[in-house]
Amino acid sequence: MTALRDAIVSVTAKLITDQGWQAVTMSRLAAELNVSRQTVYNEVGAKPQLAEAVVLAELERFLAVVTDAFDKHPADVLTAIHAAVRGVLELARDNALLHAVVSATHGANTELLPLLTTHTDGLLDAAKAVVSRCLRSYELPLEPPQLEIAVDLVVRHVLSHVMQPSSSPAETADAVTWAAAKLLSSTTRP
């Protein structure tokens, strides 16, 4: 990302957090950054592309937590998974931008919520790629297709708890780690 793109995404995230998506306009961003409106468009595209850029930038923060957890536990995959899940859920719990997006009023004009709920292909693909990459350094008894299924199940489950938590990050991390232990120890073919 360029410095200007980073600044646009950062100002957009602050506006969303403070005032909601409806407060975000290209003119307002241009004024906040002391650039022309056309410069904002040239850098990020139209508002749907801006929404995607904000979500992807926030996703990078979450995926950094995942990578860090695996880096800190190179010899114990289950401890790494637990740390990653707990870290992601703790970040989600305290994430003002995520809360602003998720708590948007029903029917509000926002391109952000669908990126987190119904149009999650890019988000899921990025998360699954990071988790798969992190798991490569461990010796696991699963063939690649089985591992892909396990990663998909865990990532989707954690994402559902990011969007709608049902227990504490620690309790959810315990449950996900238990399920991951079962999935990763399976040697039977689907």
Image (tube, rainbow, N blue to C red):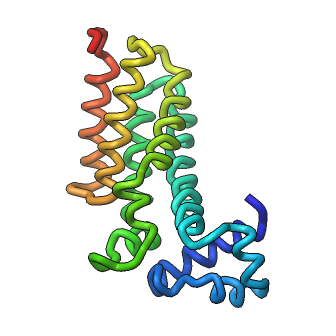
Give me the residue at 26% from left, 58% from top: 165
Q: In the figure, 43 relative to 176: above or below?
A: below
Q: In the figure, 110 relative to 161: above or below?
A: below
Residue 4, horizontal then vertical, whole percent: 76, 70
**Which quadrant of the view contains residue 106?**
bottom left
39 lies left or right of 90: right
Residue 53, horizontal then vertical, whole percent: 59, 62
**Which quadrant of the view contains residue 109?**
bottom left
Q: How many discs appear?
A: 0
Residue 76, horizontal then vertical, whole percent: 45, 25
**Quarter of the figure that contains the N terminus:** bottom right
**Quarter of the figure that contains the C terminus:** top left
88 lies left or right of 34: left
Give me the residue at 63% from left, 88% from top: 28
- Between 190 and 135, the one lying in front of the other is 190
Residue most toward the left? 166
Give me the residue at 53% from left, 47% from top: 63
Q: In the figure, 179 relative to 30: above or below?
A: above
Give me the residue at 30% from left, 43% from top: 157
